[in-house]
Amino acid sequence: MPSPRSARPWSSLLTALVTAALLSTSTAAASPTETAASGSGRRTVVEIPPDVTAGVAVFDRLTSRFTESYQADRPFRSASVVKLLLALDFLWSRGPSYEIPQADRDRIGAMLISSDDAAASHYWAAGGGSAVISRMVARLGLTGTAPPPPGYPGYWGYTATTAADTVRVYRYLLDEAPAPVRDFVMGALHRSTRCATDGFDQGFGLPSAFDGPTAVKQGWSGFSSGGCGASAALAPEGSTDATSPALDLVSEALHTTGTAGPGDRTVVAVLTLHPDGTPFGSAYNKVTALTEALDVPGAVRPAGIRFTTWGSGVRVRSAATTASSVLTTLPAGVDVLVGCQQRGQQVSVPPYVNDWWAYLPQYGGWITNIYITSPDNTLPDVPICS
């Protein structure tokens, strides 16, 4: 259960308003991206929060044009995004039939759907470690991807990659890969789970910014989300005890990549670094807001109003009562999309009492309004559930 705060969240409301201002389109508060004309001829300027380092590339497959590009060739440590290359390297040698043993189907599926680290370590070792990256760089013509730096041969998450190269990987999958490979890998990414195998919350970025259909492969390093009903341990590639002049191995990394729109119309790659010690909820919100603001043709932005939660382990329930089943839990301080609100069971978290509950359409469940930052028991501008 969340721990109640000593005061009603007025201070959090102020913090939320300040954060919203930082994420707004005020050029005084952030640096604009490099702009690119979209298929419609419109030009966009996307704001990057001042304490976030980002590489962004958005490619519209229908028009064969980039709609967004910002530091797209800047190298980032890939974290779990490298699992795309691990899967492709294994599948490359399957032959014309592309028969995949069931054990590998299960293992690769877990690696792509729920970002299973043990599976990644298996294919890293089986493929010869850094040799996997060297092979895939040559095969796909990647220009900013490189094996982990010297001294870290086993750290597959320290593989360097760029937003532009990530888009190239997805374009290969969608437009060039043999059908069995495309269907297997993209089918897994379309089934991406909110909770990773280790309990990490994968709901940031693409899954929160857009309604389906989306395919998603997330990456993180240095964070513990505390969501999905469990406290996630740091991923093995998330060690923060090293530095490198060529690749930042210290700042927390949070990446969202995949596709959006019917027929996987648009490929999105958003790679970000955050100052060491950044709370996961803060990074979660910034990456989601940045992704949502991008020009992503074909993507559908969900209806509702975003509010910030407070407390960790906030429970999302199947009905507006504490007796109903728990669907999931939320990390501390994340923005959630509220579709409507209604009265339900009265909940007491001294000194607060509230019988209003918020419906979260992206989770298909309810949370008590007590744990949503708002000056009143009801949420402003949110309709009553019909």
Image (cartoon, rainbow, N blue to C red):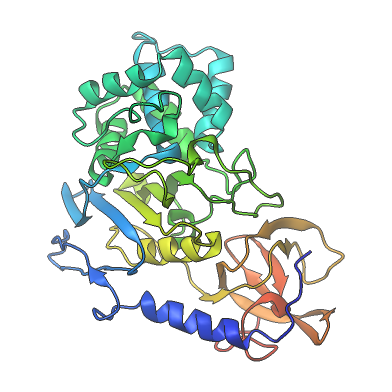
**Residue at the limit of the structure toward the right, as seen here:** 323
Q: Residue at x 39, y 35 (%)?
A: 158
Q: Where in the figure is residue 255, as x and y percent of width and height?
A: 41, 49
For this view, does 326 lie left or right of residue 121? right
**Residue at the limit of the structure toward the bottom, as seen here:** 376
Can you say whether 72 is above or below 34 in the image? above
For this view, does 24 lie left or right of residue 105? left
- Classify the position of the C terminus by image quarter: bottom right
Instruction: Using the rendered view, name the quadrant where residue 330 is placed.
Output: bottom right
Q: Residue at x 53, y 12 (%)?
A: 101
Residue 98 visible in the snapshot: yes
Q: Could you say which is closer to the camera, residue 278 or residue 198?
A: 278
Residue 386 visible in the snapshot: no
Q: How many marks?
A: 0
Instruction: Using the rendered view, name the quadrant where residue 246 is placed.
Output: top left
- Classify the position of the N terminus by image quarter: bottom right
For this view, does 258 lie left or right of residue 314? left
Q: Where in the figure is residue 15, as x and y percent of width and height?
A: 51, 81
Q: Where in the figure is residue 238, as x and y percent of width and height?
A: 50, 41
Instruction: Using the rendered view, name the quadrant where residue 327 is placed.
Output: bottom right
Can you say whether 315 is above or below 383 in the image? above
Q: Where in the figure is residue 263, as x and y percent of width and height?
A: 34, 44
Q: Residue at x 65, y 84 (%)?
A: 9
Q: Could you say which is closer to the camera, residue 15 or residue 299?
A: 15
For this view, does 326 lie left or right of residue 278? right
Can you say whether 184 is above or below 244 in the image? above
